[in-house]
Amino acid sequence: MATKFLLEQAILGPRVQLPISEQRYKEIAHAREVLSEALTFEQRYELLLGNFISLELSFTEICLRSAVEPEYRYPEMAETLRQANRHVVNVLTAMRGYADQVPQDFKCLQRPRKFAQLAKAELVKLFERSPDYRFLCGLRNHVQHKAEAIHGWESSETTREDANGWAEHIRFYARNASLRGDPDFKRRILDEQPEKIDVRRCTRRAVHELGASHIELRKQVAKEVQNARSTFEAAILDYKNAGAESVVGLCARRASSQASSTVSVLLNWDDVRVQLVEKNDQPPSLWPRPNHRTPKVEQISSLRAQAQHSKAQAAAAIFVSEQRWQDFEEGLAMPEGLFHLYQLQTKLHPSHRIVRRSAKNKNG
């Protein structure tokens, strides 16, 4: 029996059998590999995001209960600490799993520069540009071999600045001095961090940066992945045009006297990947997106430099915490009114000045 290559449904009963070439069969088989790898790639990132969301939900619930139902008994406080550590460890594990496994993706792609090289290079750039990601990498190794991630918590100074401050009423921290007791924790990483390291904020920034890296890697393989989906779509369309009333169970089949093999030609499973790509098209951020009136980060930092202020001095000028000013320079939308206030306080407003009233004017 000569080897035949067909598009047909893997069902009982009458069905259309559409002959195809060996080359097309191989193209369909390769497309299946590419789409499978792409789905795994997106699901691995989704696993990380799922653990990150669980951490945020848990920490927010802890903050809410602390604000509404303060609890000071040690057993309850110890349970809160255990819960916080559990969620942090889940995120650290998912983050490490992503970094370890992504370079193994897309081995089926034939290209001058292997995907593994691209992935490793992108992860190195991520490590170099993000002190928060560096810290979490070190913290993950510390947690795996030495001790817990969260050492304590305290009331956050930023909670007094807006009505929704209860959501971050509690700040969970790792103590720098305690981590320095681990000789394997790199000192240069700890030197970048304060004495009390806000693990929740570090996690947010690190996941955001890793998200940016994931999107960049997705772009690197987007053409091959789209070509693979187009290969499936063309096969389905050709089968329908050959007179098939349904494509349920459609596959490409290699039939010979020696052995047969089939490749499923369906797209409902790849639709899951498409939905994940559409959902995760931006790095995760809990900050609202700026509008056209929001001062840009460059404007904020440039104005502070022009005023020759430290971040603490700039924050004091508009009556916010130093951490909140740091947020503004990292991308949190600064209210337009605060920006104008800072311009006025520093006498750098383009059209207005603050005029202090004299004692005589105060008395009428």
Image (tube, rainbow, N blue to C red):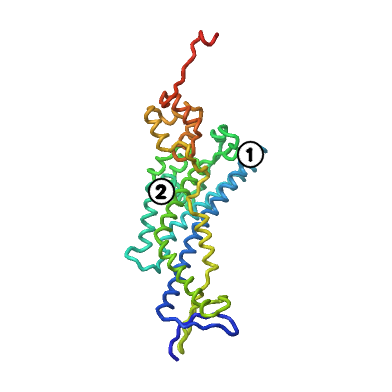
Q: Which residue is mark 2?
A: 184
Q: Is residue 93 above or below residue 237?
A: above
Crowd around label 1: few <14 · some 14–19 · many ≥20 (10 Å): some
The quarter of the displayed image where residue 113 is located: bottom left
The quarter of the displayed image where residue 154 is located: top right
Q: Quadrant of the N terminus?
A: bottom left
**Residue furthest to the right:** 69
**Residue furthest to the left:** 112
Q: Which residue is pictured at 42% across the width and 47% down the height?
A: 134
Mark 1 or mark 2: whose residue is earlier in sequence: 1
Q: Position of residue 186 (x, y in %)?
A: 39, 46
- Label placed on residue 66: 1
Comparing 284 with 349, the one in front is: 349
Looking at the rendered structure, the kind of residue marked 2 is Asp
Q: Which residue is pictured at 51% across the width and 77% down the height?
A: 241
Comparing 273 with 124, the one in front is: 273
Looking at the rendered structure, the kind of residue marked 1 is Ser
Left or right relative to 165: residue 175: left
Element marked by disc 2:
loop
Q: CA distance from mark 1 to mark 2?
A: 35 Å
Q: Position of residue 341 (x, y in %)?
A: 48, 27
Contact (Cβ within 8 Å) of mark 1 with mark 2: no
